[in-house]
Amino acid sequence: MTEHTVRSYDEELSHLNNLIARMGGIAEAQLDASIQALIRRNSEQAGKIIAADAKVDDMEHEVHAFTVRLLALRQPVAHDLRFIVGALKVSGDLERIADYAANVAKRALVLNQLPPVPPMAAVPRLGRLVQEILKDVLDAYVDQNQEKALRVWKRDEEVDDMYTGLFRELITYMMEDPRNITPCIHLMFIAKNIERIGDHATNIAETIHYLVNGTPLLDARPKGTSVLPEPPPAGEGN
């Protein structure tokens, strides 16, 4: 960000940037913890993730209030306006990412009560890929690095393809033994929530491109073949 004549304005923009960075750090940690809770069948950890989701919601409200104040008092233009509006959009994506991580934890609580099934080992691989993408896009946001953001954007297809392969594997296990149906359905929803986190990371990459260039990313988003209907909205109760 360029320096302004009014020092307090620079401090306000820096504060907004720090809010987004903190939100991103929490959302990233929530995703990692939810996957660990699934792998380790740790219900206590899953419960903590679900409880912590409210903190990200509160931070999103704080970002909204702060951006409205900046827009009203500073009347920003050009890059400053894009930066403020971009922060507002990114905060929404981060809130949804944290919601989906909480959904993974909710499903993990249920799975912990059921015998493990072999496909469970494949879900963390998808989770690690999305974690890597999320970390990269958050770094790109802090640095306003459009090249790094574009690399993240191009990896959306990789996430879709891994998700589709996992879905087919789960279908196979359900067909082989009806006793696998319940745990595999929960794993399907977990995988879909993780895939949706990847979509929100891609949204952030597109916002970074607009923030830096002042123009939207017009290329069609690279997408693999999705084979599973959308899960219930993030923030589901079960």
Image (tube, rainbow, N blue to C red):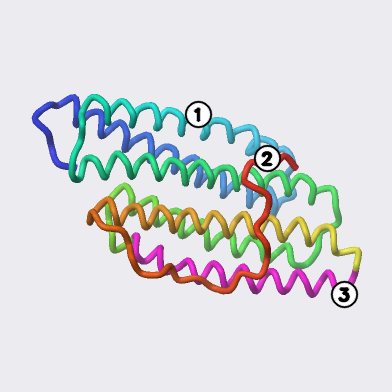
Q: Alpha-carbon neighbours of circle 1 within 10 Å: few (<14), some, or many (≥20)? A: few
Q: Which mark is residue 45?
A: 2
Q: Is residue 203 left or right of residue 195?
A: left
Q: Residue at x 53, y 45 (%)?
A: 96
Q: Which mark is residue 176?
A: 3
Q: Which mark is residue 185?
A: none
Q: Alpha-carbon neighbours of circle 2 within 10 Å: few (<14), some, or many (≥20)? A: some
Q: Secondary structure at mark 3?
A: helix
Residue 58 belongs to the span the image colors magenta? no
Q: Position of residue 39 (x, y in %)?
A: 69, 54
CA gap between label 2 and label 3 equals 32 Å
Q: Answer with the quarter of the image where residue 195 lies.
A: bottom right
Q: Answer with the quarter of the image where residue 218 lies.
A: bottom left
The mark that comes first in sequence, 2 or 3, is 2
CA gap between label 3 and label 1 equals 45 Å
Q: Position of residue 63 (x, y in %)?
A: 39, 32
Q: Is residue 64 above or below residue 129?
A: above
Three-letter amino acid code at the position of disc 2: Gln
Three-letter amino acid code at the position of disc 1: Asp
Where is mark 1, residue-wise?
Answer: 58
Q: Position of residue 40 (x, y in %)?
A: 71, 51
